[in-house]
Amino acid sequence: MSRAADRMLGLILMAVAAAYAVSAARLEVPFAYDPLGPKAFPFGLSALLAVLAVVLLVRPAPGGRWPTGMLLLKVVATLAVLALYGMLFSVLGYVLASALAVLALAWLFDAGIGKACMAAIGMSLGSYVLFTYGMDISLPVGTLFGGH
Amino acid sequence: MFDFLIHGFGVALTPLNLMLAFTGALLGTLFGALPGIGPINGIAILMPLAYSLGLPAESALILLAGIYTGAEYGGRISSILLNVPGDAGAVMTALDGNPLARKGLAGPALGLSAVSSFIGATISIIGLTLFAPLLASFAVNFGPAEYFALMIFAFSSLSVMMGKDPIKTLIGAVLGVMLATVGVDAGTGVMRFTGGLPELYDGIDFVVLVIGMFAISEILLMLEHLGSDSGRLAPIGRVLVKVKEVLFCKGAILRSSLFGFIIGVLPGTGASVASAVSYTTEKRISDREGTFGEGDMRGLAAPEAANNASAVGSFVPMLTLGIPGSGTTAILLGALMLYNIDPGPMLFSEQPRVVGGLIASLYIGNIMLLLLNLPLAGLFARVLTMPRWLLVPGIALLSFVGVYQLHSDLMAIFLMLAVGIMGYVLRKFGFSLAPIVLGFVLGGLMEQNLRRALAMSGGDYGVLFGSGLAIGLWCAALTVIVIPMVFSGWRRLKASAAR
């Protein structure tokens, strides 16, 4: 594979180092009890990162394989499912949100629709029993159903 | 001098802690056997749940340490039966383990690896018991300057030994330290790098970081391996190993245990280096008939003894100096910090219950693991064939419940996903995640100690080199970086001379 990926990473890291240093420089320090203060250590870090980024630019290693097409779509879809799961977690309650998340994830990971349904019902109810009665963890009931 | 051990057994032998050690061993073996889940992922996923059980610090650590050592046992099963190593530490196990299984010796191979893992871990625990108090009494002399130099040494040895790309290892460590600087500055109360988000005022939460990096990014990576799912399991038969076979390997096991322990103690070097070094050493010493790689028992025993020995050895710097020896012990140390226990040279003397209890429970857990793994290896092997469509939702549920237990707000979930994306992208760039966790765990302490040292000297940087100990540590850090350079330069010189 090409070395372009590492070169790009080098540039990104330079930008990170710069942004980090700028953010540190903008800190307003009313009073520091130690001679170093809260700025010096971050400055050191960003300088170190900048040096390492230059090394990466000069001596990039061949990169790995990046997801494209269908795989990239699946990565994005998986992230979307996880984000939605997070948003619905306390709205729909643990059991319902988890059942939907398991259904979607199992389907994304190549289970047939029948298997995905079985996994969704089995895992959401099974894990609820395990967490609630086995480990005494309290899980959200769901604001939709009068929980809080 | 060994009071701590007697105390420790008092802690470890309570019914609760015995049960936790057993649960840890069982869960760890199961998680280690799962496809694509190594010890570090297992600990990361289960750590918040262990924390939310409301256990005292020593009990939580006993549970997590049981999971860690158990996962080292479980990881070998897929190496031997499927030729699919669960993590880098199990790669060498597959070289001779899988050929043995294909010869129809799967049962004896599993038995031998359990016995050599047991011997390796036991020798290493004895080493830990003898060595830790010595190192701890020495570490009491550490001031902030020495501690800072020690961390520099840890990072330089990490960058050289871990991973194939030292530059990326160092970048990972720096990024980890940078992440640790987010939040309120303890010295002045100034908010740093929070972007105005109140959720970040206390810093990035350790649990959120660890789950994002090791669970979420793993889920994303697993999408790539769909369709290339596991082949057929070799029939196992009875898991029995003959005494004669163990005796045949005794040299390999003893040498590798010793190597494993020493390599485990060095900061930054873990199971993967230990098993590789011991395998190549045994091959050089014992491989007279060229049977290594084709199912030689010694070629299986050596890396198995070594990786378990190094897993235990990595507890030495963690418990005595507060410097984790591997990514996995970094997570354990981070878990301790959740209990407001400051890692550092004083851990051993200030937290005798935690340290003694942990060491004692390692003895007990190791025996439990042997007893579990001989009769039940066949059962554990069933886990290997678990399809991804069951595994991935399972990881997701455990991760979300774990994070939700500590932060029931949406921001934490989004932060977890963001860290997961970062981890995924970095792994695609060829980074390993362990240096980032190490950097994150040590970053805060590193800055604190640097500032404390300079505050004591009134800003004079000379204090960093002010004692023999500090100078020694700086020299050690320099040596670790320079020696491999000299070696490769010398080798290149020799190669060009030969031409």
Image (cartoon, coloured by chain):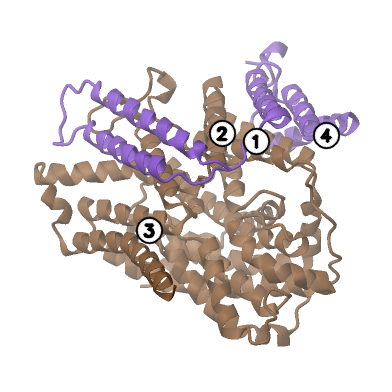
Chain colours: A purple, B brown
| Residue beneath the point at 37% across and 58% down | B157
What amino acid does circle 1 point to?
Answer: Leu
Q: Nearer the viewer, residue B39 or B360?
A: B39
Quadrant of image for the N terminus of chain A = top right
**Which label belongs to residue B157?**
3
| Residue beneath the point at 63% across and 31% down | B400
Query: Can you identify the residue that label 2 sits on?
Result: B420
Instruction: Tell me where residue A64 appears, x and y as whole percent.
Output: 58, 43
Query: Can you identify the residue that label 1 sits on?
Result: B220
Residue at mark 3 to residue at mark 1: CA–CA distance: 30 Å
Chain-order first, disc 2 or disc 1: 1
Quadrant of image for the C terminus of chain A = top right
Left or right, residue B348 beside residue B333: left
What amino acid does circle 3 point to?
Answer: Ser
Count neighbours of disc 4 (C-alpha within 10 A) and say few if under 14, some if 14 to 19, many if 20 or more. many
In this rendering, the answer to whether B5 lies above or below A2 is: below
Q: Chain of mark 2?
A: B
Residue at mark 2 to residue at mark 1: CA–CA distance: 8 Å
